[in-house]
Amino acid sequence: MARVNVVKRIKVDGRWIMRSIPRRESGNWDWNALPEGRYYVEWYDGGTRKREPAGTTASQALEVHRRRRHQLEAEELGYLSVPAQPVRTIERPLDALLKRYLEGIETPKKPNTHRKYESVLERFAVRFPKRSFESISIEEVNALLIDLMKHGMKANTVLHNAVIIAQFFKRHGRGGFLRELQLPERSTSLPREYTDADLTKFFGVCSDTECALFSTFLMTGFREQEIMYLSGVTSDSICIPPGSPPSARMVSLPSVARSARSRSLQSSSSC
């Protein structure tokens, strides 16, 4: 009987190769054994190996495998062969998919994170108006990333945009997208370092309230939204309450920041 194999195109050590889908002990294919990639079915016709695309999901690969195997068996049995019908890909509107995706991640993502996803994906949708998700190619996404850099976007920001786009593609059945993009190298900038003399000069011209604020920034590493949501200070720690952007927790307050805060409270009470 006709033998038709399912293979997967995957990237190994920077090279694209074809690997057969391994089978479990039960004899069924193990679809999760190989990295993400595209499926193909292959068979031999008169000693010549032939190959046919089989989609990006296991269900698409199984359907192509079934049709090709039945056609080859019909030819072997002498029945009139009918040309195998290509797999019909459902064209999904990009705008509708983006809208549902953003609605789906609104609850699990923090507000700032969701706003970033929304900004990146809305820009992506503007680039491809009235297009289907399946019609967008790797080359077109690469061109978008290059244009972003030409218009002044930093390499790290372009990389972040690419990750968000790749996550959207993976959610809708096109995994491995990020590995096929031509991405810029990540740049790492050295943090600015202030000397003790710089800090002494800076705090020397601060009021007690400013000293308390900037000492807390300096000694805790809090971001400004975390500072905004501080609800209380004990002798040794600060409480960040539930319901604020960060999670509720107690954070140790360094002695320098505690001393600055005490001077600020004394100054406020004397007014």
Image: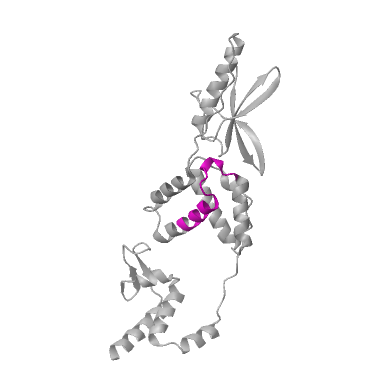
Quadrant housing the N terminus = top right
Q: Based on the picture, tell me whether residue 123 belongs to the magenta stretch.
A: yes
Regarding residue 180, the answer to whether it shows in the image is no
Q: Which of 197 and 170 is in front in this view?
A: 170
Question: Which residue is at 57% across, 38% downward?
Answer: 37
Please state the horizontal and vertical placement of residue 233, each as a whole percent of the image: 32, 74
Is 82 situated left or right of 211 in this image? right
Question: Which residue is at 58% across, 60% downward?
Answer: 156
Is 104 situated left or right of 9 in this image? left
Instruction: Please report the bounds of the magenta region as a residue range.
Output: 118-137
Please tell me how many numbered marks the rendered image carries. 0
Identify whether 195 is placed above or below 65: below
Q: Based on the picture, tell me whether residue 150 belongs to the magenta stretch.
A: no
Q: Which of 212 and 44 is in front in this view?
A: 44
Regarding residue 122, the answer to whether it shows in the image is yes
Please state the horizontal and vertical placement of residue 130, each as a whole percent of the image: 51, 46
* Res 11 → quadrant: top right
Is 131 situated left or right of 143 in this image? left
Identify whether 193 is placed above or below 89: below
* Res 241 → quadrant: bottom left
